[in-house]
Image (tube, rainbow, N blue to C red):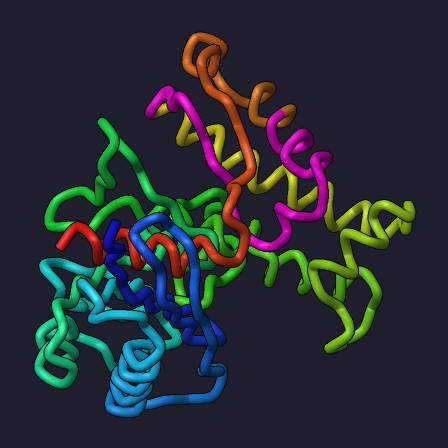
């Protein structure tokens, strides 16, 4: 049986990941470009085009299309507004631009809908992603959980992302160690020290569990979700992570709303974003 292929581009806060995926969901080839420095709109688009061409050269046959997960508000393949690390992207017809340069069919969506990075959220209703009116909603990481609280990277105060992201976890752990900065502090290290019963790690992790579960509990109370899937590298720390979140969510939800809710870890790990982008491309 003849296979077909797609290219997935997952644009995150620190890197651009790209890969070739077959129609059976197998990742055949992948690589990443770092984008943790300041890049202009033109430079980012040049990287995307270069990544597409590099992947297309590795595909066993002509690719069916390209799926791009982009952080920001996306409508009809247009970036209405990029995330805080990509502020130059306002009303950019990214899909048409990449199509014109590569001569491939391109679809663009919010990176979280492709299973991207950060404290984002994607609603799946009747088997399809739902982003609200003109795809401008479902910004679940931008839910206020502390009035007048910590400043989010986007500038707003008290949003879930400012409290429950791994970046926030590392920041709190650094604060508990009474140092201004350490590049040795990572989510992986904090989990390791938490399991070794280090007091600072226990405090930081328990706060993280409480903040994230509070956000999730609010969503469950609204949607009475059948399933909550939690992704990200920290979820691969062990089964204790999902168990801790799940236990706290149950305590914070209306029982009738959460009786049919299961909380699970995403299965695809760091490949999730690329595979999601490629899956979207197969639907063009």
Residue 150 relative to residue 136: left or right: right
Residue farthest top in this picture: 256
Q: Residue at x 13, y 55 (%)?
A: 284
Residue 276 lies, with reference to residue 245, above or below; the image says: below
Residue farthest front in this picture: 1
Q: Which residues are magenta?
A: 223-246
Q: Residue at x 65, y 48 (%)?
A: 236
Q: Is residue 32 visible?
A: yes
Residue 27 relative to residue 163: left or right: left
Q: Position of residue 234 (x, y in %)?
A: 64, 51
Q: Position of residue 4 (x, y in %)?
A: 24, 58
Q: Position of residue 162 (x, y in %)?
A: 52, 57
Q: Position of residue 149 (x, y in %)?
A: 52, 53
Residue 179 lies, with reference to residue 168, above or below; the image says: below
Q: Is residue 148 visible?
A: no
Question: Of residues 267 and 220, which is closer to you in this image?
Answer: 267
Picture quadrant where residue 138 is located: top left
Tell whether position 216 is magenta: no
Q: Residue at x 18, y 42 (%)?
A: 132
Picture quadrant where residue 35 is located: bottom left
Residue 191 lies, with reference to residue 16, above or below; the image says: above
Labels in figure, total:
0
Residue 68 lies, with reference to residue 284, above or below; the image says: below
Q: Residue at x 89, y 49 (%)?
A: 199
Picture quadrant where residue 213 is located: top right
């Amino acid at each position: 049986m003849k296979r077909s292929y797609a290219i997935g581009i997952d644009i995150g806060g620190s890197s651009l990941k790209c890969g070739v995926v077959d129609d059976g969901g197998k990742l055949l080839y992948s690589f990443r470009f770092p984008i943790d420095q300041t890049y202009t709109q033109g430079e980012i688009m040049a990287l995307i085009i270069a990544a597409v061409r590099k992947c297309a050269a590795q595909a066993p046959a002509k690719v069916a299309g390209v799926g791009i997960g982009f952080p920001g508000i996306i409508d009809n393949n247009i970036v209405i507004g990029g995330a805080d690390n990509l502020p130059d992207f306002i009303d950019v017809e990214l899909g048409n631009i990449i199509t014109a340069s590569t001569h491939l069919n391109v679809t663009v969506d919010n990176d979280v809908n492709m299973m991207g990075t950060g404290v984002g959220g994607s609603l799946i209703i009747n088997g399809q992603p739902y982003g609200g009116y003109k795809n401008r909603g479902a910004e679940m990481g931008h839910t206020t959980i502390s009035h007048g609280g910590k400043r989010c990277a986007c500038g707003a105060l008290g949003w879930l992302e400012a409290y429950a992201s791994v970046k926030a976890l590392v920041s709190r752990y650094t604060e508990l160690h009474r140092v201004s900065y350490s590049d040795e502090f990572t989510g992986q290290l904090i989990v390791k020290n938490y399991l070794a019963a280090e007091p600072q790690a226990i405090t930081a992790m328990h706060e993280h569990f409480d903040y994230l579960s509070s956000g999730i509990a609010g969503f469950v109370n609204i949607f009475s979700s059948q399933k909550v899937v939690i992704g990200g590298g920290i979820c691969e720390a062990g089964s204790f992570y999902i168990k801790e979140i799940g236990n706290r969510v149950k305590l914070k939800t209306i029982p009738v709303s959460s009786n049919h809710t299961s909380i699970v870890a995403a299965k695809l790990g760091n490949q999730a974003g690329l595979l999601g982008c490629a899956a979207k491309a197969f639907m063009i």
